[in-house]
Image (cartoon, rainbow, N blue to C red):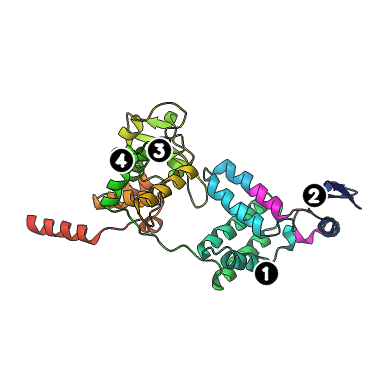
Amino acid sequence: MATFQKRGTSWRAIVRKKGHPAQTHTFSTKARAQAWAKEVESELENRAAGIKPGLTIGDALKRHEAHLERISSRGRKNKTSANNLRKSIDTEMLLSQLQYQHLVTFADTRRKVDGVAASTVMTDVMYLSGAITTCVVEELAPPTLKASMSSWRAGLKRAGLIGNPEDRDRRPTDKELEELLIHTRHNRALRHIGYNALIRFAVDSCMRLDEICSLRWADLDAANGTIIVRLRKHPTKATDQVVPLMGESLAIIEAQPRKEERIFPYRSESASNGFRRVCQNLGIEDLHFHDLRHEGISRLFERGYQIQEVAMVSGHRDWKSLKRYVNLRPGELVSKDRARSGSA
């Protein structure tokens, strides 16, 4: 039997049934609370759906967030997708009621109203898919729901509502890098975040900004020239990785003041936004901080390192995923060929 309690501007629904624990949830309107209670009562009578009674989309998102906090260091990007879903999809809806058309409406709204790219919507949908997988693993939802989500993603992709991001091959020119380093060395307004060291380190280390800002002094092995990158990005499970410090990476680290536990004690989001403003001030267009990683990886290939050696630095697990970062300059390849021909 369901009961309802008004709490401020919200309504709390309570469903009690003999032999089952009480189910409670708070909603913005009484109508939503009544609809939820009716569905829960139905599920308690017939558990054919295999989904925990009362489990909402919002509950699934919270569980997935908790899961990601345990295994991943990419908090900012995770929260962005979760917030996008909360703004544009009915998170008070029971997970058992989720249908393909709900995803179509969500994706279409994100594309037309928010004006984002198909690849951005893909990231949001993949986050929801991950939330469903978390519920399946925790035995709160049946594997069939995960299979349905996979089918729905295929439908969204076929409709052009979601899509993979285009490979980005932007590399800073020598002139752009020189301008950035000069500007960040002498501009007193940028002293709060050590951009000069960050930029040089990003190119030499080939690390992501999130990884750089999470490096700790305790994980540095200066004698061997290595450092541990905690919870490094991985398609299925983030893992700790011992990484060689290439170029001037070690020297840049040792030049940093030991004031905190982290070597570069900055928020990655703040550093990224600041880098964008520096580029705008210098008139450098379409350059992201992540492009510095691209530059560093490309330089390693240009210096003659093999795929497996570069992968040890970059953290990539296979050639296919590493290939998109490689953008060798044609002129340099011609110069190498001419040098070899001349020495033959």
Residue 20: x and y in percent read 85, 48
Q: Which residue is mark 4?
A: 246
Q: Is residue 218 visible?
A: yes
Secondary structure beneath label 2: strand
The nearer-to-camera label among 3 and 4 is: 3
Cα distance in 3D space between marks 2 and 4: 53 Å
Q: Which residue is mark 1?
A: 101
Q: Which residue is mark 3?
A: 189
Span of residues in magenta: 47-64
The nearer-to-camera label among 2 and 4 is: 2
- Our reading of the magenta stretch's main secondary structure is helix
Q: Residue furthest bottom?
A: 159
Identify the amino acid type marked 1.
Gln
Q: Badge 2: few (under 14), some or many (20 or more) residues near its Cα, within 10 Å?
A: some
Identify the amino acid type marked 4.
Met
First in residue order: circle 3 vs circle 4: 3
Which residue appears at 46% of the width and 62% of the height? 165
Q: Which residue is mark 2?
A: 25
